[in-house]
Image: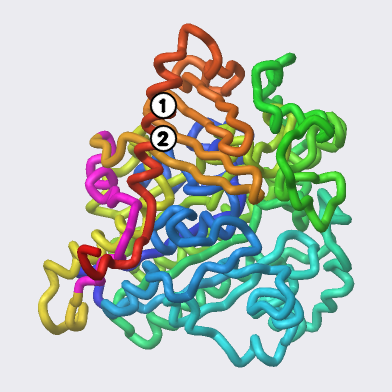
Amino acid sequence: MSSVSPRPNILLVTTDQQHARTVGALGNEHIKTPHLDRLVDEGVSFDRAYTASPVCSPSRSSILTGLYPSGHGCWNIGVALDQEVPTLSAALAGAGYRTALFGKAHFQPVLASGGFESPPNIFDRQFWRGWDGPYYGFERVQMVHGHADEPSSHGMHFGAWLVEQGVDPDRYFGPRGFHREGSWDLPEEYHYTRWTADRTIEFLEERSRADDEDPFFAWCSFQDPHDAYLAPEPWASLYDPAKMPPFVRRTGEMEDKTALHRAAVSNDWTAFPGRATGDPYDSDKVVQCLGWATDEIGEERARLWAATYYGMVSLIDHHLGRVLATLDRLELTGDTIVIFTSDHGDYLGNHGIWLKGPLHYEDVIRVPLLVRWPGRVPANVRSESLSSLVDLAPTLLEAAASGSSTAGATGAAGDAAAPAALPWVTGVSQLHTWLRPHEKSRGWCLVENRAEVDIYVKTLVTQRYKLNYHLSTDEGELYDLAQDPYEFTNLFDQAGHAEVASAMVRRLLQVSGEVEGPYPPRQSFA
């Protein structure tokens, strides 16, 4: 295979619900992530990267489309991304890229009766053995979704493969899931994290054997370290719960927070003014996805969860290392942009809460973002430039187009057609910032979270301040991230910060207008 290609290959590696501070080389001395550390050393780490929505389907849809949830329409889990919405994968495929997705998609509901990513379809082993795409612009897919031992975790391509290996899913999964935590007796060789890495590696090796010189866009989509907190050995025992770092919290910190905060931490929803649908998996979770409080589960169990979570991250890191080693072995490293990120974070016990939800602490809306592109992106640089996952699609399209502009009409790059721009895209290309990490491409990040029909939170982050505005209850939070990085003190109603709060609210209104759409074209004056 040619060692130099004018158009870069693209490998997007994502995790699900990974806290931004779970990378060893970025300052977490408690966690072992040697392969993530390698990416830090060989590329740029963006310390101020934010999700477009701290919920799986909306965030993944924003990555794929370059639109915010209010634009692409997938506003929560249980809502499908319209297959007519233009995608990054389709644009790259149209320009001659080989496109593939391995692991979690979650572009469609996973509990809707009769849905494509829902039971009973996901357990039709014969169907999944015979189908591998196309799907949302990906020419080839091998999929699994679900987390830990819940039933859907043994569906789709992964479930069909498990059965072919002689594994009885009933022994390790379900019936409802979430009834195990800590150590999982599922052998690591049959774990979905390994399976996702294996499928990605097979794709790379197949291209090499076929001497396929068309560039590729591959999405390696791990579905951990999402709860439930469960890992196979030896990863479940890699960290001692008693030696986990202390949780970030302060006595009395809820006194100036919103009604939603107070209800979530106390698990007392009698005074909460909003309506919610609840969680079908747990009647105690009034707002779907908003997890348990440490006061409910106890300190000992919380430390077990944190230790297991770290083990899940290290397991992913191990298999990321195998993927990176494959790029090295196939001499693809120099031609490939590698992006590592997560769809959103996890409270991870900080402020006394777990999982994710419409409490927009940095824990849940900020994500790791590592970019490596040898010879183009500088090595071992940390950047404070603001970045959003909604920027990935336009950035990667510009990167692919820049390669096309230097390619000839024939040869290794084929006809070198530049990918079509995505219409209505509201993300901004960060390519300039990738190449010059300290030169900013945006001055704000927006996070949208319609957690329930009656619970809608919008967040505006600037270089210094963050505003969380609760549209449903007309409450606000204002934090000075420079002085209060852990968001202990809400300045929104403090007299000395009224001018800043007012300016942030006005800017949020302006930003919301900027990202509206798409709109159908106007046909005439009237």
> Where is residue 131 shown, x and y percent of the image?
58, 89
* Residue drawn at the location 85% of the way across and 37% of the way down: 301
- The image quadrant of residue 413 is bottom left
Task: Give, as a single range, the part of the protein colored magenta.
Answer: 418-438
Label 1 neighbour load within 10 Å: few <14, some 14-19, many 20+: many
Secondary structure type for disc 1? helix
- The image quadrant of residue 319 is bottom right
* Residue drawn at the location 55% of the way across and 36% of the way down: 21
Compared with 267, 419 (above or below) is below
Inspect the image, locate mark 2, and give the three-letter code of the amino acid beneath it.
Leu
Quarter occupied by the N terminus: bottom left
Compared with 430, 192 (above or below) is below
Label 2 neighbour load within 10 Å: few <14, some 14-19, many 20+: many
Disc marking residue 168: none
Q: Is residue 433 magenta?
A: yes
> Where is residue 279 shown, x and y percent of the image?
78, 53
Q: CA distance from mark 1 to mark 2?
A: 6 Å
Quarter occupied by the C terminus: bottom left
User: Is residue 150 left or right of 387 when viewed as pictured?
Assistant: right
* Residue drawn at the location 31% of the way across and 34% of the way down: 443
**Residue designated by label 2:** 508
> Where is residue 249 shown, x and y percent of the image?
69, 22
**Residue designated by label 1:** 504
Residues tagged 1 and 2 counted as in contact (Cβ below 8 A): yes
Secondary structure type for disc 2? helix
User: Is residue 40 left or right of 385 when viewed as pictured?
Assistant: right
